[in-house]
Amino acid sequence: MLKIITISFMILIFLLLVYNIFSPLFKDSNGMKQQENRKVVTEKEYKEQKPSIEKKDKPSKDGSWMKNTIDNIRQQEPIQETMAESIERIDGEVGDSIFIRIFKKEAELEVWMMSAEKYHLIQTYPICAYSGDLGPKLKEGDRQSPEGFYYVTKSRLNPNSKFHLSFNLGYPNRYDRIHKRTGSFLMVHGDCVSIGCYAMTDDKIEEIYELVEQALLRGQRHVKVHAFPFRMDDKKLQVFSRNKWYQFWVNLKEGYDFFEENKIPPDVGVEAKKYTFY
């Protein structure tokens, strides 16, 4: 009996040794088959969808997957037209009348150009820096960028600005003065720094400044600049219904809606301490 147990134990040990030796080979073989199957399916999917995807999804040469992912995102972003392309698209030219809108929350500055008796959007620029919170500028030194309806004349251009290039918005306007708001030298300029102005990068202000300057030299009486806290659709405005500036913004939205409907910026007046549009 003891002899049978001993033989059985030795056979068991032998089988375990054989399994340990050959099982990795079986695993590798199965794994390779599974990988091959997955690879075939993946290539088929890529071919059925979009051939370029396979190329974009390959890891970068330095092995940085994050870098490759960022590059892919950038490749998929729409490429904005150059200023020249945008002007050509609307059959315009440098020197035609322009209009500017600023959106504080989105940090964007739009340039519109007149063609065929209405304005067309030709460029949207990221604002590099502005200061303060949503809401109007109230007093000198509050480091708040203004909101409201302003305009630029030849005398408000400054090609020798210490902020590369600049044009003054004309704050305080009549509305601001009626509400006893104070401040001075509120501009759109370069150098990407702000203590109350809307600052652009130097290359962007060069493009914007040229359009403003040439329009004024070609006879545009003044370039209107409308500065809003955000893009003023009904849903966004409702989000701020409890904000202390809500009624002020409702008034600004009248001017915003006028342009959205007509694609012509309104003439702006002030009556009963409110903006009026016509």
Image (cartoon, rainbow, N blue to C red):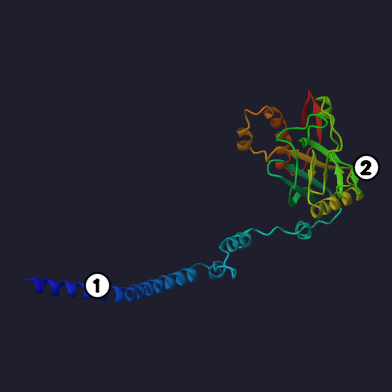
Going by the numbered disc 1, the residue's amino acid type is Leu
Q: Are marks 2 and 1 in contact (CB under 8 Å)?
A: no
Give percent across and percent down for residue 240: 63, 32
Report the side of 14 relative to 113 (left or right): left
Determine which residue is flagged by label 2: 155
On the question of residue 96 being in view, the answer is no
**Precedes in sequence: disc 2 or disc 1:** 1
Q: What element does badge 2 sit on?
A: helix
Task: Name the kind of residue labelled 2 in the image.
Answer: Ser
Q: Which quadrant of the figure has residue 15?
A: bottom left
Question: Which of these two is toward me, 259 or 59?
Answer: 59
- Left or right of 89, for residue 59: left
Q: Which quadrant would the C terminus be assigned to in this image? A: top right
> Which residue is drawn at the image coordinates 67% and 38% (left, top)?
232
Rendered location of residue 47, percent (x, y):
49, 71
Location of the N terminus by quadrant is bottom left
Q: Nearer the viewer, residue 36 or 15?
A: 15
Kindly indicate the quadrant of the structure image that contains residue 76: bottom right
Can see residue 252? yes
Determine the CA span between mark 2 and mark 1: 95 Å
In the rendered image, the vertical position of residue 147 relative to residue 36, given as above or below = above
Q: Is residue 22 left or right of residue 212?
A: left
Q: Position of residue 45 (x, y in %)?
A: 46, 68
**In the drawing, what numbered circle is on residue 16?**
1
Mark 1 surroundings: few (<14), some (14-19) or many (≥20) residues within 10 A: few
The local secondary structure at tag 1 comes to: helix
Between disc 2 and disc 1, the foreground one is 1
Q: Residue at x 72, y 29 (%)?
A: 248
Task: Count how many numbered circles sit on residues in the image.
Answer: 2
Looking at the image, the residue that sits furthest to the top is 272
